[in-house]
Structure formats: structure tokens, C-alpha cells
Image: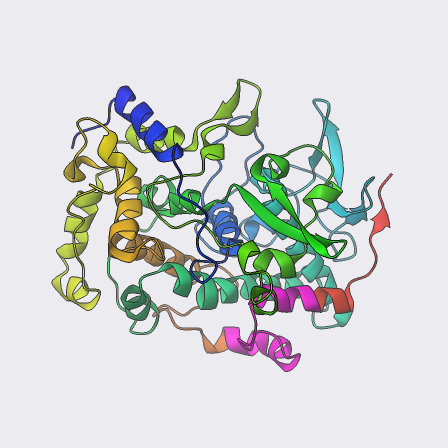
Amino acid sequence: MCQLSDTQIHDIALAMTQGRRSLPAPTLGIPGFYTYIGQMISHDIVPNTNPFERVRNTQPMLNLGSVYGDASGNDLRFAGDSAPFLVQHRFQLARNSNGLTDVKRWPRDKKQLACIAEPRNEENAIILQLHILWMRYHNALIRSGLACDAWQARQLVALTFQWLVYHEFLPIFLAPRVYKALFEQGMTLYDYPHTDTVPSFFSHAAFRFGHSGIRPFYLIHRHNGGFVSASLADMFSKGVPLADHQQIDWQVFYAHARFSDRFEHTRNHAMPIDTSVASEMAAINRHNPHFSTVNIVERNLQAARAIKLDTGTAFYAAIAANTSAATAVDLQPVTDFATSPLASVNGLSVEDLPLWLYVLLEAETQHLGQHLGTVGSVLVGEVIKRAMTLGNMPLLDASGLVSARAKSRMTPLFKQGLFTGLRPAILDVVSFVQQHEEPAHVQP
């Protein structure tokens, strides 16, 4: 296995963050909302490696531990904190000094850090507001009577999140044949060792495909008959109360169909899954006292190099060794990158590409960046499938189908007309919250 040199990593980062193509056509693409569902999945099951942040007990089960704290689900408290996580079974939310619903905050190092279980969910105002929406949904379930206590509410919130991932996120991002094989036919396409953490091929490479989909700006809410957009710089903030210019209207952010005819040019489609990354991702503020910014491309490649992760072609070969699986998903190799920005980097070959780059290139050359290729789909799909079969509230049975127990537990939600597939699940959540939410108190 050939490891990239520092010079090659630097050159790749330059090539991938310069000359980014124009925004995707409104008639194509993936709703940008799902980029941040991917980030929430990552923060839920991938351990935090930032030594300067409080770290919780992360396990490879998709149960919204990033919102609720302790991965076992038996102790609804902040990891490492003695204060109760919930008061009277509800999350504590408040109107901040800007008049917006926000989390409780506590002063530290001249900032007002969010009192949430997962510090990474304050990395940007989009993921923070998504985190807050799940907290509001929890409270609304209690107030509506569909949940009588915090544990029942948590079960319903976690099942709702998995329902969204299973019915929307995975079908959007996975190659159709891979989704069918994993979740309809119950096949195992790549057998990896199961431990108490997600595998490094997922955390250090395959699931980082979402970085290519980040837009330079997003349409976030309506104002005076028009729409307000926010840049990445506007949304990357930590340790400060949410501000009006960051406030998200999820109907607008999702770009639901009722907006599409009149405002085609403003739809928040994600960028294609390819070997280009928004130039803004070359200098992200990581809120780290030892360095001010980080280049996301360099960070990803250095992380994989540090653990000597196998190349993309090595993972292709491992999947291809299962001939029945390879046939079922029509596994095809990546052969070149002549049309990719990577072509400008000296000494680079397909055979030596790190897995992350291989996954991006596969999606770009075989599917025009509209969804993952076969290798990327298999690696991502296998890990998330397992994550939804573990824990105290799994959506799936061992074969990858929605379990009878999970359907029974969600029946009260279905009876409310929720999650019928007529509109995106997150908009059902928003509607339910608006009907049953109690006003937030003003935070001093």
C-alpha cells in the first residue's frame, strides 16, 4: 500500500477546493438537508476525536445518543455532568437574547457553550437547530400524551430518526441495487469485524463523502416576501446564542415541492458527490485553541494515513471476493480520473487512491455524483444497517427489515397521520411540534 506524501496531500487539497463547479441544476440533485442528517448520524455513532472537547460514550447504535447523552439510554444525563439532563421529563429550552428558541448555555472561556450532550452538534447553526428540533419533538410528544415519560419519548424520537434514515437518507444516497440487497433481500455484502465502535473505513473515509455535498450558502428562511440566504461563514459559529440571520425555517431549508415551481433557482440542493469540495471548506473554524482553521481535505487524508487505512481498490477487491454479492450489486471498478480535479496531482494513480477519494471518484464517474457508487454504498450501508439493529430501540430486525415491534411502537404516530410518505418525515416532525409545543421561557 502506497501512502500519500505531505506534498501530494497538499496538492490534492488545492485541486479539490479550487474551481468548484457551479451549483447543481434545480431539476437534479439531493436536498441539502440530508447532508446534515448525515452529520447527525456521524455524531451519533462516530466517536469525537477532538481532545479539547468533552467526549461522551459513543457506541455504534443509531439511537440519538448525541441528543440524549449516555449511549445505553438508561441515564438521561449529560455525560460527565451531575445535573439532570431533563426536568419533569422535558428538555430545557429557552428564548435567548435574540428571541429565538435555543438550548441552555453556560459560560466558559468567554463563550456561552451549548448545554448539549454532544459538543460537535454545535459546530454550525444548522446541525444545532436540527439537534434542537429533536429536543422540541421530544417535549411535544410528552405534551401531546403520546409519551408518558422521558423514556417513552426517547424511544419514539429515536425510532422517528431511524425511520427517516431508513426511508429517505439511505434510498437517496445508496446505489439502488445495494439498498435492495441490504434492506429488502437481507444480504450481507461486506462482512467486517463487529466491535464496540464503528469501523475505521466508515469513520475515517467512506462516511466522509458528505463533505463534498456542502454548499457555499443555503436558503434558510423567508423575509419581506423574499428569501434569506446564509453563507457557511454565517452558519459556522460556536459558543454564541443563535442569531436571527441563522434562523432556519425547515420548510424553506428542505425546499419542499410547494416552493419548487416558483423558486427553482433557490432550491437547497446539495453539491454532487464528487472530487470537488466547496472552497469555504479549505479554512473551517474548528474553535480549537491550538489552531484557528483546518482544511477539510487535508484533515480527511491525514486521518486515513495516520491509521494506514487500505486503499479504495483494496476494499473493492474485498467486496468483489464475495462473488454472489458482487453480481447482485453489479460491482464495477473505477478505472481512471482523467476528468477529475485529481488529474492535476503528480504521481497519483487509481490503485493508490485513499478510500475516501475512491468513494468520491466512484460516485462522480459512475453516477454523475447523484448517489454513491457500489463500494461506497456497501461500506456505508452495512454500518448504518447494523446501527439500526442494536440497542434498546432498534428500528430493524437482524435481516434489515423494519421489525414488527418497531412498527407497533410507532403506531400512535401513524394514527396521527405522520410518516405516511406523503411528505418528508422532517416536515411531519415540524408540523407535530408546532401543534403541541409549549412556549419556551426567556433565558436570563
Question: Depth check: 165 or 216 in front?
Answer: 216
Give the residues drawn in magenta, as a range: 406-431
Question: Depth check: 200 or 3 in front?
Answer: 3
Q: Is residue 79 visible?
A: no
Residue 73 position within the rendered picture, expressed as x and y whole percent measured from the top left: 58, 54
Screen quadrant of the C terminus: top right
Membership of 307 in magenta stretch = no
Main SS, magenta region, reads helix
Q: Residue furthest bottom?
A: 415
Figure check: 45 above or below 393: above
Membership of 414 in magenta stretch = yes
Residue 171 position within the rendered picture, expressed as x and y whole percent measured from the top left: 40, 65
The quadrant holding residue 295 is: top left
- Residue in view at x 78 percent, y 52 percent: 87
The quadrant holding residue 401 is: bottom left
Residue 264 position within the rendered picture, expressed as x and y whole percent measured from the top left: 54, 60
Total labels: the figure holds 0
Figure check: 337 above or below 319: above
Question: Depth check: 83 or 95 in front?
Answer: 95
